[in-house]
Amino acid sequence: QIMASKLTDETLPAYLSTLPADTPVVNLSNNLLTSKSCAALQSLLEKNKSLVTLDLSNNDIDAEGAGLLSFALQLSTTLKTLRLADNKFGGKGALAVASALQVNTSLTSLDVGGTDLDMESLIAFTTVMANNRTLTSLVLDRPLLSSVGEEIATHVSRMLVLNNTLEHLSLRKHHIGETGLARIAEALLRNKTLRSLDLACNKITRDGAASIARALAAPVSLLSLQLDSNAIDDDGAIAIANAITRSNIESLSLAHNRIRGPGMDALSFVAAKTPRLTCLRVWGNPAICGATTNTVVCEGLVRALAVRGASLTTDVRPYEVDGKHYLAEES
């Protein structure tokens, strides 16, 4: 009955009292919790020694609440996953969370995306992560930055060179452009552990794609790369496609870029000939959707999908009209 509506500061204690003392996963996302609830959450972290996952995404926790949670995080020895996404605690709250990573040795996954991170707090996270040896997944999406994200890319690059445990890093909407991506790509050459990199919704164009392609062909440790919703054109797509055959990449997303015929043809060829590539997302590019759809290009991708069958997951679905091949977005 308590969960029939969103939890509030007033109803949270009653809900927590119904949970078994050894509950391993507590999902409190999408509620109306504020910093007033953090005392109860502190108690939860202190008393429940079986708790490994706590999801507080999309609540109303402010900087004060983030500070209280960070104190509890410093004392926790069991929590492995903490999701704080879309709580607007800003730079001050993020600094408190970052400081907890200097002490905590159990957390392996942290999501602070959409929390209004500022440059100071982003630098704090990258500095702490240079020495952190337990966190394997870090989400720093959608910070509040007033300039192009080349400065933060410098700090991320240093972190990638020094850190030897991080496996997943998400930097969506950081305004990273050509110079910043070139620095990150260079750092990837010296990193041996990163498996997944999400750079969706940045300012990456042809030159940035060429930089990451050179790193992929080295090859580097990356298995998954997300570059959707950038401004990558045919030349960039061709560079990445050529690198895929020499890389370790298993999953590639280039959806919603500016790829037309030549770029999509190159990706189709690689998809058909590279069994290691098991996921390819390309919907939203002008070659295969909307008024600019090229049915010849679509046919090439349809053939590639037929060759791979169930061994390749995509975000497109082929269909035929009057003998011509088209693609629809796979829901």
Image (tube, rainbow, N blue to C red):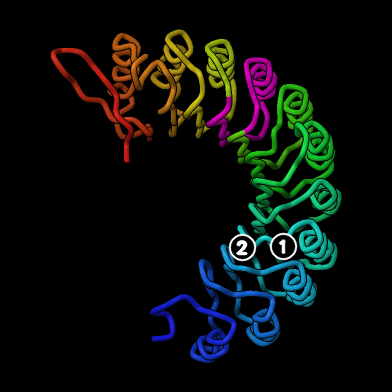
Amino acid type, label 1: Phe
Q: Position of residue 216 (x, y in %)?
A: 64, 24
Amino acid type, label 2: Arg
In-front residue for pair 294/247 = 294
Q: Position of residue 144 (x, y in %)?
A: 72, 46
Q: Position of residue 310 (x, y in %)?
A: 31, 34
Q: Residues in magenta?
A: 202-230
SS for dot 1: loop
Q: Residue at x 49, y 90 (%)?
A: 18
**In the picture shown, does residue 114 fall above or below 102?**
above
Q: Is residue 224 magenta?
A: yes
Few, some or many residues within 10 Å of mark 2 (<14, 14–19, 20+): many
Q: Which residue is mark 2?
A: 83
Q: How many angstroms separate mark 2 from mark 1 (CA)? A: 13 Å
Q: Residue at x 38, y 33 (%)?
A: 314
The quarter of the picture where the C terminus appears is top left
Labelled disc at residue 89:
1
Q: Position of residue 226 (x, y in %)?
A: 56, 34
- Please report contact status of discs 2 and 1: CB closer than 8 Å, yes or no: no
Of the numbered discs 2 and 1, the one sitting upstream in the chain is: 2
